[in-house]
Image: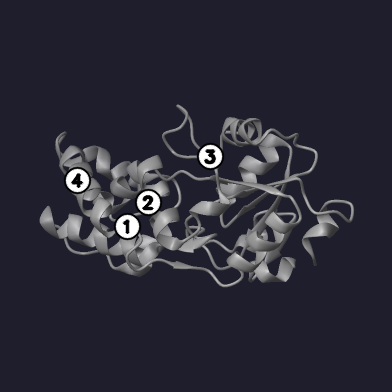
Amino acid sequence: MKLTALCDGRYPSHVLFDLDGTLVDSATDLAAVVDQMLTNLGYEAAGEPKVRAWVGNGTEKLIRRALAGSLDESAADRLPADKYNQAFEIFMALYAEQNGQHSEVFPGVLELVEKLAAEGTRMAVVTNKLTRFTDQLLARSGLARWFDVRVCGDTLPVMKPDPRTIQLALERLGGPVTQALMVGDSETDINVAAAAGIKCIAVSYGYNHGMPIREQGADLVVDSLAELL
């Protein structure tokens, strides 16, 4: 199915993209940093498969999940009070160096954003990643030029799936919700789109905590963004 099939035969006026797992495969860098953080604190390394399952809800949750060794980060509450602060400082320092070093833009992304730009569609990134790391990753991956508007995990007091993230992105783009779409890789993206009253396209290759994305209620699921052309 082409993108226009979701918008009454036209290209959408605005498209909001998630970042990690949708535009860029960043899990290799994140896993390397998480494992270094854990070993520096005396824990065993988690390994990339586990870290891939933990990504998607912001830096704080990723660190807490790593400390807990589980997607359920509540076990981190039983750690000494200063353990999270230590972990946070180590993570931030390491990731500032390594963010984007081994990340790769997913196949089909460039083709789609180039086509959308040619059609006059305005685009934004809406992510739970912190602003400094979002800007750094977009720059290092060569995608920054397509996304003047970025709503990140520290832009507002709330993050996805709160619909205020979508609303702010559309305000900054200067457009209505009627011809807007969300493109993401997780249940969080599907839920925030629904809460904001816009349709959502989900990609099957991203980070959805090990759950099959096709069962999460997206308006359309694709294996590559090139399928939308």
* 153 left or right, relative to 66: right
Looking at the image, which residue is at 49% across and 36% down? 159
Image depth: mark 3 or mark 1 in front: 1
Image depth: mark 3 or mark 2 in front: 2
Q: Quadrant of residue 38?
A: bottom left
Residue type, numbered disc 1: Asn
Q: Give the class, few, some or many, for how many residues have Cα within 10 Å of label 3's Cα (few <14, many ≥20).
A: many
- Confirm or deny contact between disc 2 and disc 1 (CB under 8 A): yes
Marks 4 and 1, the one that precedes in the sequence: 4
* 225 left or right, relative to 188: right
Marks 3 and 2, the one that precedes in the sequence: 2
Looking at the image, which residue is at 89% across and 56% down? 9
Image depth: mark 2 or mark 1 in front: 2
What whole-number distance in Å separates the C-alpha atoms at marks 4 and 2?
Answer: 21 Å
Secondary structure under the numbered disc 3 in the rendered image: loop
Residue behind mark 1: 99
Residue behind mark 2: 136
Looking at the image, which residue is at 39% across and 59% down? 140
Residue behind mark 3: 160
Residue type, numbered disc 4: Ala
Q: In x, y percent, where is residue 7?
A: 83, 51
What whole-number distance in Å separates the C-alpha atoms at marks 3 and 4?
Answer: 23 Å
